Amino acid sequence: MEVVNALGRRKRAIARIFVSEGTGKITINKRDLVNYFPSGILQYVVKQPLETLGVSDKYDIKVNLNGGGFTGQSQALRLAIARALIKINAEDKAVLRKEGFVTRDPRSVERKKPGQPKARKRFQFSKR
């Protein structure tokens, strides 16, 4: 199998991944998954597509991850892994879509408007 690459985005986070056959090692920015995401919940989020298909120890994944916070980064990585698995085996798309791993979450931070302290908050109104 040749190296398969994929891209995942969430908020301001971008994950570029390279998947090859191996032993299940995930390397993020030249660091191990456990060191990069110390929280068990975030590690679980990243591994969800692999666990769903039962191929967590079949592929090595090398990741370039930048932008955003740790939650957005983990979800961007999950999307990238799901897209790469679909490139490897197209029949897995239905299973991953049913779990919600294929859909890109379009929500992002709303911009700040002029004349307001935040995006939606207004300054206090004074009648007199």
Image (cartoon, helix red, strand yellow):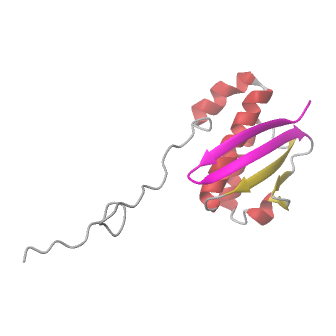
How many marks on residues?
0
Q: Position of residue 4 (x, y in %)?
A: 83, 35
Q: Which residues are magenta?
A: 1-21
- Give the image quarter of residue 97: top right
On the question of residue 64 being in view, the answer is yes
Q: Position of residue 19 (x, y in %)?
A: 84, 40
Residue furthest to the bottom in view is 128
Q: Is residue 28 above or below residue 98?
A: below
Q: Is 8 within the magenta?
A: yes
Q: Nearer the viewer, residue 69 or 78?
A: 69
Q: Is 78 within the magenta?
A: no
Residue at 76% of width from left, 33% of height from top? 85
Q: Which image quarter is the N terminus in?
A: top right
- Give the image quarter of residue 40: bottom right
Q: Nearer the viewer, residue 29 or 78?
A: 29
Residue furthest to the left in view is 128
Residue at 79% of width from left, 50% of height from top? 63
Residue furthest to the top in view is 91
Direction from residue 68 to residue 24 in the image, left or right: right
